Image: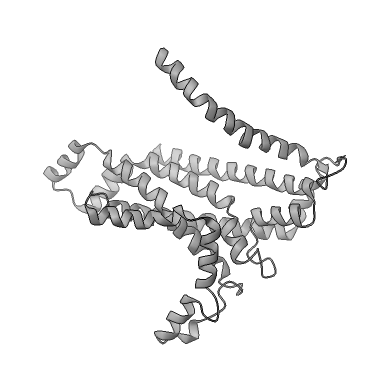
């Protein structure tokens, strides 16, 4: 009983800060979404007009489509890469620790710095990508990666994948290392092949971690903002617009705080919906 009380008291400051800076602002944002408000002056109640305007705006749907591309790229990119690296780097040798640190390093960098770095990498004149393509005889493949609507969403997805592999790698390594040694010994005795061990032993035993990682991918991808805003600002012609950049541009560029609040509420609801779908899929798979 004393231990539970101690844990509750220890967590209480963090819970209060989280409620003050996250939970309460979410509800305030929902509240402001029902008003026409420019950030100053009086609020004018307009009901659901902001939400109806959002769902009738084709730019909103383009931003949602682009966000879903980021979500798919993150799940299909970050999760498999982090899992494969975790299987290869789970040992504790100096080389493995060095590689793990190198993979985790992008997470330490500011997302603004990551956006600037990849903006230079993709630069059409002196960027690394085009320079390498020209030097290996693939000059016909060079292009303005961030301004070509046919490839710019793929281009902005790469730095997001690269930036966030590290935390998932650490989570997968911890999960794999927590698999009981008796299971490993039983696999060796039974002569289990590596692919059989992966699909029938390792993955089922770390499914909870995989589920958490997918939830984090969805939530993180739907609030993606910094890298894309630095690299493209949502352009050209809103071809890389995301829900977060759409909300930012409407809130702080044209001073429609009520409308921006409605869009931010929509982001929360969409994120919750996608996370619920992922949980349902995992539940059905377990059944």
Q: How is the image coloured?
A: one colour
Residue 167 locus on image (x, y percent): 41, 48
Q: Which residue occupies 55% across, 69% down?
A: 119
Q: Which residue occupies 54% across, 40% down?
A: 276
Residue 54 locus on image (x, y percent): 75, 52
Count how many numbered circles sit on residues in the image: 0
- Left or right, residue 58 beside residue 282: right
Residue 113 locus on image (x, y percent): 53, 60
- Left or right, residue 198 beside residue 35: left
Residue 217 locus on image (x, y percent): 49, 49
Q: Which residue occupies 44% across, 18% down?
A: 6
Residue 40: quarter of image = top right
Residue 286: quarter of image = top left
Residue 4: quarter of image = top left
Reply above or below: 1 against 139. above
Q: Which one is nearer the viewer's eye here, 84 or 43?
A: 43
Q: Which one is nearer the viewer's eye here, 46 or 256?
A: 256
- Left or right, residue 60 beside residue 282: right
Quarter of the image where the C terminus is located:
top left
- Left or right, residue 35 beside residue 210: right
Quarter of the image where the N terminus is located:
top left
């Amino acid at each position: 009983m004393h231990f539970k009380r101690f844990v509750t008291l220890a967590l209480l400051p963090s819970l209060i800060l989280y409620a003050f800076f996250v939970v309460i602002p979410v509800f305030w944002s929902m509240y402001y979404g029902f008003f026409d408000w420019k950030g100053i002056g009086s609020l004018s109640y307009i009901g659901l007009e902001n939400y109806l305007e959002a769902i009738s705006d084709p730019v909103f749907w383009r931003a949602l489509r682009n966000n879903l591309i980021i979500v798919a790229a993150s799940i299909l990119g970050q999760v498999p890469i982090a899992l494969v690296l975790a299987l290869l780097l789970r040992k504790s040798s100096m080389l493995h620790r060095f590689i793990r640190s190198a993979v985790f390093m992008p997470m330490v960098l500011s997302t603004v710095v990551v956006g600037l770095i990849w903006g230079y990498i993709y630069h059409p004149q002196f960027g690394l990508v085009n320079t390498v393509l020209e030097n290996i005889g693939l000059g016909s493949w060079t292009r303005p990666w961030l301004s070509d609507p046919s490839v710019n969403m793929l281009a902005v997805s790469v730095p997001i994948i690269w930036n966030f592999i590290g935390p998932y790698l650490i989570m997968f390594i911890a999960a794999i290392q927590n698999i009981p040694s008796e299971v490993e010994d039983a696999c060796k005795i039974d002569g289990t092949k590596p692919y059989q061990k992966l699909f029938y032993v390792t993955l089922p035993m770390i499914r909870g971690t995989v589920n958490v990682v997918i939830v984090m991918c969805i939530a993180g991808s739907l609030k993606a903002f910094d890298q894309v805003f630095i690299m493209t600002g949502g352009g050209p012609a809103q071809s890389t617009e995301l829900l977060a950049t759409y909300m930012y541009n409407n809130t702080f560029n044209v001073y429609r705080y009520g409308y921006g609040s409605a869009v931010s509420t929509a982001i929360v609801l969409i994120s919750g919906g996608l996370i619920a779908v992922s949980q349902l899929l995992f539940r059905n798979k377990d059944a």
